[in-house]
Image (cartoon, helix red, strand yellow):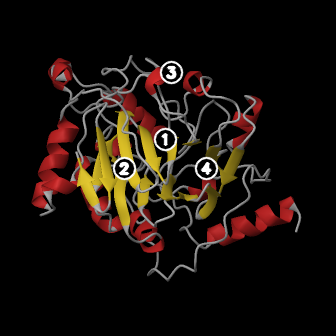
Amino acid sequence: MTQQSESASTTSTQDTEHPPRTDDPAPSLPAPLTPFPPLAEPRPLGEVRVWPRTFHDRLTAPLPGLKAFARFAREGAVRPGRAGLADIPRLPYQPGRVPHVDARTVAVTWAGHASWVLGIGGLTILTDPVWSRRILGTPARITPVGVPWDELPRVDAVVISHNHYDHLDAPTLRRLPRDTPVFVPAGLGVWFRRRRFTQVTELDWWEGAALRGVRLDFVPSHHWSKRTLTDTCRSLWGGWVLTAPDGRRVYFAGDTGYGHWFTRIGQRYPGIDLALLPIGAYNPRWWLSDVHCDPEEAVQATQDLGAHRMAPMHWATFVLSAEPVLEPLTRVRRAWKEAGLSRADLWDLPVGGSRTLSDGGALA
């Protein structure tokens, strides 16, 4: 099969796994779920593939139109007021060393925002690494990076959720050796190859690849992509399920609103040990609910996934929206308690904090 026909075959298969786009502001849920087939064989590493020109058909909510932008212009408020910023000195920040782990231990260290240093199956994997002080279009970060770059262990791989600037940071990625394996959404490989990365693996939703015994599966999210004025939805967006050789799993959601994909992901990848879920950048809801979970939705997503534990992210780093800076933490703690979930299973780490999962037990 040629690369062209293989890509077309993959795309037609994916169309059965997601609902068609609708112009309704709140799309209805898909038809009753059907069982997934067994996981497909891993795709070859570094495979060069042909993709559709656009992924607009993967949107689960319409992008904002002229009416939304007009309302936004009238109401504004994408930053908290003075009172909402007053708690910046209270944001949890406790930098520490990245735990030294072996192949039998899963460890996570929160560097801030959606950047994690993840140890799994003996590998060190970075998620959406952003070590820059500032990103395009936002004020400088309000907490320092939790892990100094020169204190990182050897980086075995990087996973990227999508191409927004707070998740795909060119200055940070330039610090990596160009032979670092990177795993990216469909359509984003050209961005890395132009920057001379030599081991770039692009995946569609529900596809996986394997690196030294660790499986990396790309899964859907309720989001979108855009980096310039002319590339809206030209590359895909999503999260990652990382599975160690012993079967333990970590789900990295990337950036996402709440919706039906969480149940689907939990069905296809049962027994998720830890879900890394976004809880910030959610106000105003009329503007952001389609693409960013609020804290209560993140707790519900954990339950939809069937995940044993949750670690919040995507807050306390950049001021991207109007909620008070400390509110995501207080709300997620309250929602977790109200859901009757074990406090020990909410890994609400400070920036720079770490937790490990070894021999079935969570260790501080």
Can you give x and y, in whole percent of width and height, for residue 186 in the image? 67, 51
Q: Residues within 10 Å of mark 4 (few under 14, many from 20)?
A: many
Q: Earlier in the sequence, mark 3 or mark 4?
A: 3
The residue at the point 44 percent across, 49 percent down is: 102
Q: Earlier in the sequence, mark 2 or mark 3?
A: 3
Q: Which mark is residue 236?
A: 4
Q: Under tag 1, what secondary structure?
A: strand
* In-image side of 262 versus 329 (left or right): right
Question: Taking the image as drawn, is residue 279 in sight?
Answer: no
Left or right of 163 in this view: 152: left
Find numbered disc 4 in the image and state the secondary structure of the residue it sits on: loop
Q: Is residue 1 above or below residue 209?
A: below
Q: CA distance from mark 1 to mark 3?
A: 19 Å
Q: Position of residue 199 (x, y in %)?
A: 72, 42
Q: Secondary structure at mark 2?
A: strand
Residue that badge 1 annotates? 127
Separation of residues labelled 3 and 4 (CA atoms): 20 Å
Mark 2 and mark 4 lie on one chain; the one further toward the N terminus is: 4
Location of residue 67 (image quadrant) = top left
